Image (cartoon, grey):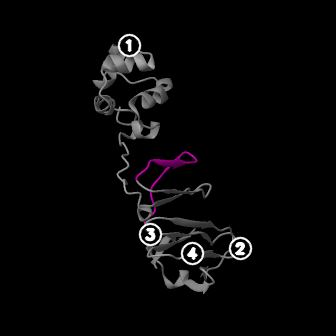
Amino acid sequence: MDNYITGSTIKRLREAKGITQLQLADEIGVSSKAVSKWETAKGMPDITLIEPLAKALGVSVAELISGNTVINKNISANMLRSKFYVCPVCGNIIRTTGDAVISCCGIALLPLEAEDADDAHGISIEKVEDEHFITVSHEMTKTHFISFLAYLTSDRVQFVKFYPEGNAETRFQLRGRGYIYIYCNRHGLMKRKI
């Protein structure tokens, strides 16, 4: 049962929501005995009940199945706490401002860990009027390229997506202290403090 939904997860989420087995059963259209069987590991919910069960318990399907609920503790909305996710199948880029359960193309994604930018991914910054022209000296071929640049401060995010055979350059308004993030499709996520 650990590979599916555990009874302890259902019980924990139900109790955290402050509802009885009967109330949960009524909400999803089953008997309270069925909920009791699930919670005591004597049975499992039918696959058709997973989505209504997750909704009734106030979690996503992924959270219900994994048993890990995500609580957004990012009350101050500090953009520097952003996390980046990149799908290895389609290249989709997802940014969150706190912990999240993210999946794309049927794959659960983990947040990327940023390393300090190296010389091979050197960032050039030139002031142009009230903005800064940012260039990454990096090849931009179909097999090796910079996918995006982002500039994060505590109160804003500026983000630009790049495509192979283009140029890895853009303009950002650099205000205050923050980080420039670079994502190379081969070397991963890197950052540089500004």
Magenta residues: mostly which secondary structure?
loop
Mark 3 or 4, closer to the camera? 4
What amino acid is at disc 2?
Gly
What amino acid is at disc 4?
Gln
Q: Is residue 8 left or right of residue 131?
A: left
Disc 3 marks which residue? 114
Disc 1 marks which residue? 31
Q: Nearer the viewer, residue 132 or 118?
A: 132
Residue at left 56%, top 56%?
Answer: 87
Q: Nearer the viewer, residue 108 or 151?
A: 151
Kindly state the secondary structure of the residue where label 4 is placed: loop
Disc 4 and disc 2 in contact, CB within 8 angstroms: no
Dot 2, crowdedness within 10 Å: few (<14), some or many (≥20)?
few
Region in magenta: 99-114
Earlier residue among tags 4 and 2: 2
| Residue 102 magenta | yes
The location of residue 127, given as percent across then percent down, is: 59, 85
Q: Nearer the viewer, residue 92 or 80?
A: 80
User: What label sits on residue 173 in the rendered view?
Assistant: 4
How much space separates mark 4 and mark 2, taking CA atoms?
22 Å
How much space separates mark 3 and mark 4, taking CA atoms?
22 Å
Earlier residue among tags 2 and 3: 3
What amino acid is at disc 3?
Ala
User: What label sits on residue 166 in the rendered view?
Assistant: 2
Residue at left 43%, top 73%?
Answer: 115
Residue at left 29%, top 33%?
Answer: 16
